[in-house]
Image (spheres, rainbow, N blue to C red):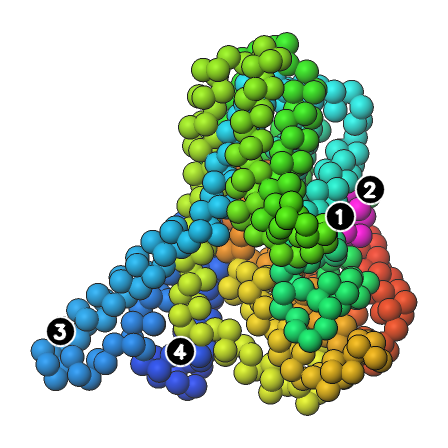
């Protein structure tokens, strides 16, 4: 009965939203209006209600294709030419051309996306080789001796996530592969592992000056030194900083709430998945028992070194560009693909020299690794296609118009920008696209102040507003089921994707609420110590309060 009520509420909300859309513009003129956000709303809502991500994303894609087709097809013309059914046929033909041609095929053919898919498959192959060699098993046994508590396992995952700050995709998959045996030994649920991975991926990269994210942000700012501005935003990036504090708190306090609490209680009893939606194949059992801890550590180090070299290579480091500029100009997708393939070749030779694997074992790991990554690849392709649908409908222009209309309220601008960035990033599943849209608007609003930035320095309000854009983009990305990073975190933890999203959401929203208060304060008091102090104090009050209330409930 509860499920039927939820479904009815969801359908009612969609109906109300469609009515609002119709009052703003007819579906035949949907581009750049409220209609543009309907496809991701449908996909996200269905995923959270049905717990089935593939069909939910596909229905959202079809909805986007249909709305776009209604906007570009001259229905009245086709009605005159051949009647109602002819017009319907033309609309559906356009819809499938958009979904398949402009959506699925274009995204699979996109060079950046292909680089990410290559990296996924190669990483899967390396992980299978480490498992076959017994490196993962040996590391798990070593960790079981040295990491004594569940909190210790969580903190170890957190530390590794912070250390791998170069790229969020790389972070998610590497941390998941290394820490999965450790967290399994200490009966930490896969949903909790996915949260720990996700919370130390984008939130870490967005405050790391040497990362693919710093490069992306720097590239959106014109007229000032982008990297200097990025560094200035770090202490004001409340969502990222508070998320890291949140992870440490819940790990040390052994405290969980929301649906995560059920998953963790079940994990303590031996059930790591709760819903049994084990969409990922079980790790291969090691075929060689003489594998040692170095058979995991050395391949991972090789992978890290090669991927970093691959990224700086694409940024021109070996042509004389300095390290920081090489990161700023790098092509993360190409760099990760080059680095992972190089690491795969070196690791094959390593395992052969160690005599823990035969050449045949190494080659069998490639299709096995691909098989492990199929769920992530499917979700990614669908997510990319859904983003294309929202792009066709000009969701970015619609949101940009909303922000520009609110710029008169400068004191409230930081919290408004944060809220808009959360909503846009959540709906589109892209943090880079979100701050790519919002930061130029902010720099346009503060154009005169930025023009004098070389002599007077960058105004604090500009820094706070750009920080709010970045924080909101990461927050929405963190919550969204169609976000690349969220999908990668599920993949790294080998956790059901909807389980990860639903258990992470209460934690992310807690931090988002506190960050929103922090940005409200920032509009009035532009002092980093006051803003950070108030935000951290409020987060701790909320967490201690939740812990006390849950303990009282029993």
Q: Tell which circle, 2 or 1, labels the residue nearer the N-terminal end.
A: 1
State the extent of the magenta-drawn residues as a range. 244-251
> Residue at the location (57% across, 52% down)?
331
SS for callout 1: helix
The residue mark sitting in front, 1 or 3, is 3
From the image, state whether disc 2 or disc 4 is nearer to you. Answer: 4
Residue 86 is marked as 3
Labels 3 and 2: the sequence-earlier one: 3
Residue ID for mark 4: 31
Label 1 sits on residue = 247
Q: Residues within 10 Å of mark 4 (few under 14, many from 20)?
A: many
Q: Secondary structure at mark 4?
A: loop
- Contact between labelled residues 1 and 4, with CB atoms less than 8 Å apart: no
Pointer 2 with pointer 1, Cβ within 8 A: no
In the depicted structure, whether residue 117 falls above or below residue 447:
above
Residue ID for mark 2: 252
């Amino acid at each position: 009965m509860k499920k039927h009520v939820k479904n009815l509420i969801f359908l009612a909300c969609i109906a109300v939203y469609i009515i609002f859309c119709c009052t703003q513009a007819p579906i035949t003129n949907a581009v750049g209006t409220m209609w543009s956000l309907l496809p991701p709303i449908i996909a996200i809502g269905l995923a959270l209600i049905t717990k089935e991500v593939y069909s939910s994303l596909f229905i959202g894609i079809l909805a986007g294709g249909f709305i776009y087709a209604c906007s570009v097809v001259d229905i009245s013309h086709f009605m005159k030419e051949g009647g109602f059914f002819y017009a319907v046929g033309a609309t559906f033909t356009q819809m499938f051309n958009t979904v398949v041609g402009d959506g699925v095929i274009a995204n699979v053919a996109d060079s950046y996306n292909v680089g990410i898919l290559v990296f996924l498959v190669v990483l899967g192959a390396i992980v299978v080789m480490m498992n076959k060699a017994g490196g993962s098993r040996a590391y798990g046994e070593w960790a079981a001796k040295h990491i004594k508590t569940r909190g210790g396992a969580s903190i170890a995952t957190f530390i590794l996530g912070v250390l791998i700050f170069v790229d969020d995709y790389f972070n998610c998959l590497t941390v998941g592969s290394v820490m999965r045996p450790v967290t399994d030994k200490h009966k930490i649920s896969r949903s909790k592992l996915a949260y720990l991975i996700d919370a130390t991926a984008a939130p870490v990269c967005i405050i790391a000056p040497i990362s693919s994210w710093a490069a992306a942000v720097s590239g959106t700012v014109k007229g000032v030194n982008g990297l200097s501005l990025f560094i200035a935003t770090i202490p004001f990036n409340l969502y990222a900083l508070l998320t890291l504090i949140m992870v440490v708190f819940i790990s040390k306090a052994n405290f969980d709430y929301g649906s995560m609490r059920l998953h963790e209680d079940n994990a303590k009893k031996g059930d790591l998945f709760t819903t049994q939606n084990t969409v990922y194949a079980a790790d291969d059992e090691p075929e060689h028992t003489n594998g040692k801890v170095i058979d995991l550590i050395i391949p991972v180090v090789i992978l890290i070194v090669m991927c970093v070299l691959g990224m700086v290579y694409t940024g021109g480091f070996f042509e004389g560009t300095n390290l920081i500029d090489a990161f700023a100009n790098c092509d993360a997708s190409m760099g990760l693909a080059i680095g992972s393939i190089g690491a795969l070749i070196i690791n094959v030779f390593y395992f052969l020299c160690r005599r823990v694997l035969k050449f045949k074992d190494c080659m069998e790991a490639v299709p096995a690794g691909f098989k492990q990554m199929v769920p992530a690849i499917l979700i990614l392709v669908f997510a990319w296609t859904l983003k294309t649908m929202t792009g066709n409908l000009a969701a970015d222009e619609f949101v940009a118009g909303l922000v520009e209309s609110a710029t008169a309220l400068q004191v409230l601008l930081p919290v408004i920008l944060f809220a808009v960035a959360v909503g846009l990033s959540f709906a589109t599943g892209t943090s880079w696209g979100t701050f790519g849209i919002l930061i130029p608007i902010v720099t346009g609003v503060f154009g005169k102040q930025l023009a004098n930035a070389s002599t007077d320095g960058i105004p604090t309000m500009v820094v706070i507003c750009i920080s709010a854009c970045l924080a909101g983009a990461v927050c929405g990305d963190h919550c969204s089921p169609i976000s690349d990073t969220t999908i990668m975190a599920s993949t790294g933890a080998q956790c059901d994707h909807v389980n990860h999203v639903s258990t992470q959401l209460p934690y992310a929203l807690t931090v988002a609420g506190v960050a929103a208060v922090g940005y409200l304060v920032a509009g009035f008091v532009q002092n980093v110590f006051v803003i950070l102090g108030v935000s951290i104090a409020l987060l701790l009050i909320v967490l201690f309060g939740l812990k006390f209330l849950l303990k009282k409930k029993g």
